[in-house]
Image (tube, grey):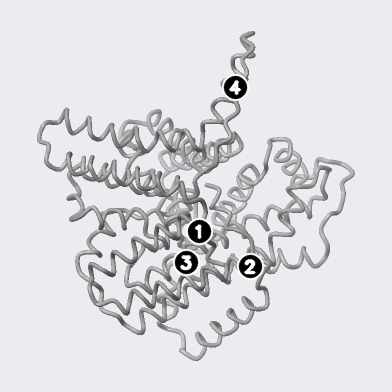
Amino acid sequence: MLFNSLTFVVFFVVVVALFWAIRSWDWKKNMLLAASYVFYGAWNPPFVLLLMFSTLVDYLAGARMATEERPGMRRVWLVVSLVANLGLLGFYKYGTFFAQNMEGVLVQFGVQYRAPAMDVILPVGISFYTFQTLSYTLDIYRKQLAPAASFRDFALYVSFFPQLVAGPIVRAIDFLPQMVTPTPPRAGRFAWGMFLMTLGLFQKVVLADTLLASASDSVFRYGGKLAMLDAWAGVLGFSAQIFFDFSGYSTCAIGLALCLGFHLNDNFRFPYAAVGFSDFWRRWHISLSSWLRDYLYIPLGGNRHGASRTTINLIVLMFLGGLWHGAAWTFVVWGLIHGFYLVVEHTLRTLFGDPRFFSTLISKIFIGLATYAAVCFAWVFFRAQEFGTAWRIVESMVGVTGTADKLLSTRELLQVGIVTVSLLTAHWLMRDTSLENVAARTPKWLIAGAWAAMLFLLILNQGSANAFIYFQF
């Protein structure tokens, strides 16, 4: 059930109407839990059983860890949670990938092995809700969180439909307290939630799908050599497309949750205005990057044990971050490229610190644009289906292909150029503030006009949208 579908519009209206019509807080939560399972089951009903299994295992593991005093037994229950969750994720998302790579490795040693065909369908959102439930058991193990008051509350936390299939990854320490007492209805909060949903759909349907997808898809599907301008347009188009696609979903999720009285943390903070790569990962997919930092990087030692250990930790962090996005070596390389960026940045800061001239506006813009260009280079490996395509596009971007084909139309080039410049300008203007603060300073008539314009363009482009890119992760 896609946010950008008429089916979801009907679903949303029914759920919101029931939620605010029901007076009992317990029955409100019961209704939301049932609605969340209906929402998830609309893709593939049997996968609801996987969601329920993960929920049950982590609820029981968390409850036992909270009452268990023996460190050894607490570790046993943590291992149960880790094995159950990562086992399911590994089988469904990486089973075929590992089997095929094992086949290739054995062939190199002269062993003729044919991996069995694994016709496994990837359960939508499994990467997101796996990390979400693991944060619950890990926080209880570290004695930073008390277990959920009821199984129903925990099940709703895991399956909460606004962010279930593509994030943000919500932590129990932020969400469970919101289920203790109901949030009283406020017209301003509901209206802001509706505005955010409109903005998110506008990013997805109009900007990502209508204006950018065509150029990006054409370049990455083309099998020949490309003119430099076309290659750059395809890569810049994808860099904007994936931002609008994923930010659009997160914005919809945050707005929808707000309409139901729940608060979800921001997942993007104008990342294409980042000054350096650490800054980029503090702004891009914040719920994932902060999860990897808190539950992987810091436990590994972070940057507390010397340069060599920090380098290893950063590489491991981004290797797993790349692999989280998909079972393909192109995703791994994308992660390793960002790991290399972070290592170089950390090394330079260790050697030279932060010179004063880096704090000037001109230097920030220069470093910011260099960061953006490097991020766009990495996106080539994220988007390409195989390395041959990635290298062909990289060669085209640097102009070493010789005679090359002009692929994109003038209209497509203009669309990518205008959207990219507008995106970068908006990010730089808003890099040190928030959308809420800007809206508070903006006249209401201007916000209403922008809202009406987005609704008009959404209606005009109805039926032209695709599934969100991050559904495949």
Q: Whole-Å distance between the Cαs marked 2 and 1?
A: 17 Å
Marks 2/4 in contact by CB < 8 Å: the verdict is no
Drawn side of residue 224 relative to residue 327, left or right: right
Location of residue 93 with respect to 168 vertically, above or below: above
Within-10-Å neighbours for mark 1: few <14, some 14–19, many 20+: many
Mark 3 vs mark 4, foreground winner is 4
- SS label for mark 2: helix
Residue 340, given in percent of the width and then of the height, sits at: 52, 37
Quickly name the residue at label 3: 251
- SS label for mark 4: loop
Q: Whole-Å distance between the Cαs marked 1 and 4?
A: 41 Å
Q: Camera-side residue: 19 or 449?
A: 19
Quickly name the residue at label 1: 271
Looking at the rendered structure, the kind of residue marked 3 is Thr
First in sequence: mark 1 vs mark 3: 3
Drawn side of residue 129 relative to residue 361, left or right: left
The image quarter in which residue 167 lies: bottom left
Quickly name the residue at label 2: 207
Q: Whole-Å distance between the Cαs marked 1 and 3?
A: 15 Å
Q: Camera-side residue: 250 or 88?
A: 88
- SS label for mark 1: helix
Looking at the rendered structure, the kind of residue marked 2 is Leu
First in sequence: mark 3 vs mark 2: 2
Marks 3/2 in contact by CB < 8 Å: the verdict is no
- SS label for mark 3: helix
